[in-house]
Image (cartoon, rainbow, N blue to C red):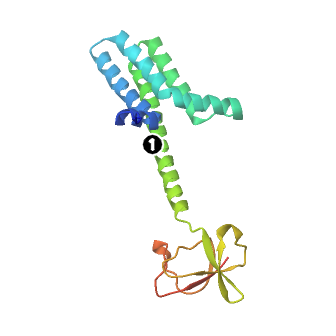
Amino acid sequence: MTQEKFSLPKYFQFIHSYPEAFAAATCALMVILSWFCLQVNWIGLALFILAAAYVIGGYESAKEGLTTLWSEKELDVDLLMIVAALGAAGLGLWQREYHLIIDGAVLILIFAISGALETFAMERTERNIRKLMAITPDTARVIINNQEKQVPINELKIGDLVLVKPGELIPTDSIILKGIVPLIKLQLQESLYQLIKL
């Protein structure tokens, strides 16, 4: 008997992988819906939806801001943004100018979107760095007493002479002593041997 692997539908996987993006999208929908409710004079429903938008969109920023305040004893932009949005909401409720609450929600939405974009960018950067690390060779061709010897990368020392043959990847950071190096594609021309010093 075989076990079938349970998998979530794609949109649930997206929510699980990118909760900041989901929070930003939900906050945006709530801000639009609350604006519509204010236009048709459904103030109670608009205020309820706006409160949910504040919580959903501002949760991560509030958490990061309070963590920074507590651990580093410093104010950061996340906490200041939450305070400004709550100030706008308080002023809007006090003066019954509900557009100010919408303004605070838009501020939270902007920070939620920036947090989601930052998460996307960081994950893409990490993925690209992992790909680059995966193509690093495990060994290097070292010249010792005019003879080539394959040596693991972790055994290389400063001052070792490394020979890179055509089509091989450069195994480590180094200085080129001889040869022409077209490193634009991170591979060497087939007709040239390169002598590299660490």
The quarter of the rendered structure image containing the C terminus is bottom right
Query: From the viewer's perspective, is 191 left or right of 68?
Result: left
What residue sits 48% from the left and 35% below the top? Answer: 111
Q: Which residue lies furthest to the bottom in this view?
A: 146
Q: Residue 30: image x %, image y %? A: 36, 23
Please tell me whether residue 177 is drawn above or below residue 37 in the rendered image: below
What residue sits 30% from the left and 12% below the top? Answer: 41
- For residue 93, which quarter of the picture? top left
Question: Crowdedness of circle 1 by 10 Å Cα count: few (<14), some, many (20+)?
Answer: some
Name the residue nearer the viewer: 40 or 160.
160
Query: From the viewer's perspective, is 15 left or right of 81?
Result: left
Query: From the viewer's perspective, is 164 left or right of 120?
Result: right
Describe the element under mark 1 as helix, strand or loop: helix
| Res. 45 in view | yes
Name the residue nearer the viewer: 125 or 195.
195
Name the residue nearer the viewer: 98 or 49.
49
Q: Residue 123: image x %, image y %? A: 49, 47
The quarter of the rendered structure image containing the N terminus is top left
What residue sits 52% from the left and 27% below the top? Answer: 59
Q: Which residue lies furthest to the front in this view?
A: 1
Q: Residue 68: image x %, image y %? A: 65, 33
Number of marks in the rendered image: 1
What residue sits 73% from the left and 73% below the top? Answer: 157
Name the residue nearer the viewer: 67 or 86.
67
The residue under label 1 is which amino acid type?
Leu
Please tell me whether residue 106 is drawn above or below residue 168 in the rendered image: above
Q: Residue 46: image x %, image y %? A: 36, 15
Query: From the viewer's perspective, is 110 left or right of 134?
Result: left
The residue labelled by disc 1 is 117
